[in-house]
Amino acid sequence: MADIELQGITKRYPDGTEAVKDLNLKIADGEFVILVGPSGCGKSTALRMIAGLEDISDGELLIGGQVVNERAPKDRDIAMVFQSYALYPHMTVRQNMGFALELAKVPEAERNRKVEEAAEILDLTQHLDRKPANLSGGQRQRVAMGRAIVRDPSVFLMDEPLSNLDAKLRVQMRTEVSRIQQRLGTTTVYVTHDQTEAMTLGDRVAVMRAGRLQQVDSPRNLYEQPANLFVAGFIGSPAMNFFSADIDGDRLATPFGDVPLPHRLRAAAASAHGKRVIAGLRPESFEDAEIAHQQNRQGGHEFEAEVELTESMGSEVYAYIRLEGDVAESDELAEIAADTGASEVPGGGTSQVVTRLSPETSVRHGERARFWLDTDKLHIFDPDDGTSLGREQDVVAAAPSPAEARQEEAAPRAPSA
Amino acid sequence: MRHGTREYTTWSIAIAAVFVFAMFPVLWIVSLSFKTPATVGDGRLVPKEWTFANYNALFSGGLDSPLLRPLINSILIALIATTIAVAIASLAAYAISRLDFPGKFVVLGGALAVSMFPPISVVGPLFDMWRALGLYDTYPGLIIPYLTFALPLAIYILVAFFREIPWDLEEAAQVDGATPFQAFRRIIFPLAAPGVFTAAILVFIFAWNDFVFAISLTSSNNSRTVPAAIAFFTGESQFTSPTGNIAAAAVLVTVPIIVFVLIFQRRIVAGLTAGAVKG
C-alpha cells in the first residue's frame, strides 16, 4: 500500500519533443485513478515512467513518500498489467503467475498457496497447468491480472488492459477489474483511451491531452463541471454539442435563439459582456418539446429545427439536427475547437447537433420539429483558451463517493479504434 | 481442396525426380563403401560382392587407426566451437537487438566483413601465426578460426530471432523483479531456442565439414579432423586407390551430422512464442 506523487514529471526525448509536460498528480493510498486521453496524449508514457520502464527527464516521482526516480522497476514494488498481456509463452499459467515470487525467492509451498489463492479470485484454478497459447483472450487477460495480484504490490499499473478484448468480454472484465481492486484496496493507476472505462472504474479520472494534464476529478464532476473545452468534448458519448454564442447581459444569443443564462453563469457572463463565447450542451439536455411539456419541465427554452437523422437505440432516440445560421460562424468555431483540442473528439466543431430524446418521441427525420433545451445545463467556454467560464469550484469538494459515481454509467459507446 | 489426378501425378513425378537427383550420389557412395577393391569400378549400384573390409580397415589398430582419432577430434572440435559460438553469439545478438549503444552498426558490419574473406586467403598468415604462438596442430588452433567464421552467421540468425520476441515480455520480467541477466536467461533465451538451435546446427555443420583449415593447420592425428584425415588415406599398396575406404569414411562422417540435426530439429518448433501477446 502506498500513495504516489508526481511532481512536475516531464518526459523529453533526445530530439526535444515532450511526451509528458510538467505532470503534477497526487494519488492517495488505495485510490483508483484513471489516466485517459486520445492517442498520443502521453498517458502511457506517464504510466511507464511510474513503472520505471521509461526514464524521467524532469521532476520527481514519489511512491510511498520516497523518491524512486532512479530505482529499477523491480525495486519500486509495483506490478503492471500490459496491454498485450506479455505472458511468458513457455511457462504454464502457474509458472507465469509465480515467476515474480520465484525471483523473490519465496518458498515453493507459499508460492503455490498464493498462486492458487489468486487463481481462485480470477476463476483460473482449472487452467493453472495450461500454457498461454491454449487460453482464450479473456483467460489470458485474467492471467495477466493474476500475475500482478500474487505479488501483493503497493501499486498496480494497468496499461489499457482491456483494449484487446471483444466488446462483450470487455464489459465483463471491466466489472471484474473494479471488483478485484475494491477487494484488494491496492493503489491503482489505469491507462485507457476508452472513456466508458474511465467513467465507470475510477475514483478519480485524470484527462490528458498532448502531454498536459487537463483536469483531475471524480467522473461525475468531469462530466458535469468540465474544466475546459477539451474535457467537455472528450468526456461523454455522444460528445457535447458546441456552438458559438454571444453574451448579452443575462442572456445568451445562440443558434437556437436567445436563451436566459443560468444563475451560476451570470457572474462570469457579466465580466464578458458582449463577448463571443463557445457554448456547450450535452445531448441529454435536449428533449422533444412535447414530451418536455408532458413532464412539466421548467426553465427551458424551445426552438424549432429540421431533423436530419434519427437513430433509435430502444431506450433512447438520437436525433441529429443541423444548426441554422451563418456557416462562417461554425468555421470559426471549428478553428477554435481545433486550437483547444475539442476537434480531437468526434462531433466537436461541427454544426450538427446531437440530441438524446425519450423513446416515446414522435420526431421523424426530414421533418421539422419543436425541441426543448435545458438552459440550466449550459456550459460556456472562453474562445481564446477554451477554459470553462463560471465553473463552480466548490462543487469539487462535494465529490460523490466512488460507488455513486460508478452508477453514473455513461451511455454505451462503440469501441473506438 | 481436392486436387485432380493429373496434378497429383505431375507432382509425384517432380518430387521423385528431385529425390533421385539428390539421393543418387549418396546411394552411390554407400554402395562404393561395400564393394571390394576389385569391383569398385564395375559401375553397378548394387555391389556384386558385399564386404565390410573397408569399414574394418578404418578402425583397425585402435587409436592409431586411420579414422578413430580424427573422428574423436572432429566431434570434440565441432562441439566446442558450436557451444562457444552459440554462447557468444546469443549475448552479442541480444545486445544488438535490444540495446542502443554507439558502434552497434560497426559491430554488425564488422561481423559481416569478417565472413566475406575467403578462408583460403587467411590460411597462409594463420599458419605462420599459429606456429609462432604454438597453436599449430592443436584443438584451439582450429576452434579459433571456426569461431571467427561461424560467429557472424550465428549472430545474424539470432538477431533476427531476438527481434521477434516482444519487448513487453522483457519489461514484464523487469517489473516481476528480474535482473537483465535473469530476464535474458529465463525468458528471452528459452523463447529464442529455435533460433539458437538453428544457429547451432549451422555452426556445427560448418566446423564439421571444414577442409581448408583442417588440412593446413594440422600435421598429425593429434588434432586432424575427419575431412583432412580422409585426404591422407592410402590404398593397401602403392598401386591401389583407397576408393572403398574413402567411401566408407564419407558414410561414417555423415552419420553424426544426421544424428545431430535430427536431435535438434525437434527443438525447432515453429510458433513457440504463440500465446505471449494477443494478435
Image: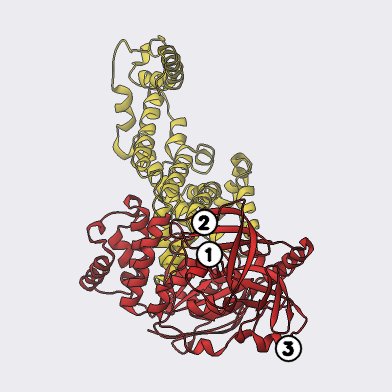
Q: Earlier in the sequence, mark 1 or mark 3?
A: 3
Give the alpha-carbon distance from disc 1 to disc 3, as whole Å.
36 Å
> Regarding mark 2 in the picture, which secondary structure is present there?
loop
User: What's the residue at 60%, 78% (across, down)?
Assistant: A213
- Residue indicated by mark 3: A271
Residue B41's tag is none
Disc 3: host chain: A
Give the alpha-carbon distance from disc 2 to disc 3, as whole Å.
41 Å
Instruction: Give neighbour class at mark 3: few <14, some 14-19, many 20+ (Cα, 10 Å).
Output: few
- Residue indicated by mark 2: A362
User: What's the residue at 55%, 72% (across, down)?
Assistant: A54
Identify the colour of chain B in the image. Answer: yellow
Instruction: Give neighbour class at mark 2: few <14, some 14-19, many 20+ (Cα, 10 Å).
Output: few
Task: Select label 1 or label 3 by which is in front.
Answer: 1
Task: Select label 2 or label 3 by which is in front.
Answer: 2
The kind of residue on which mark 1 rests is Glu
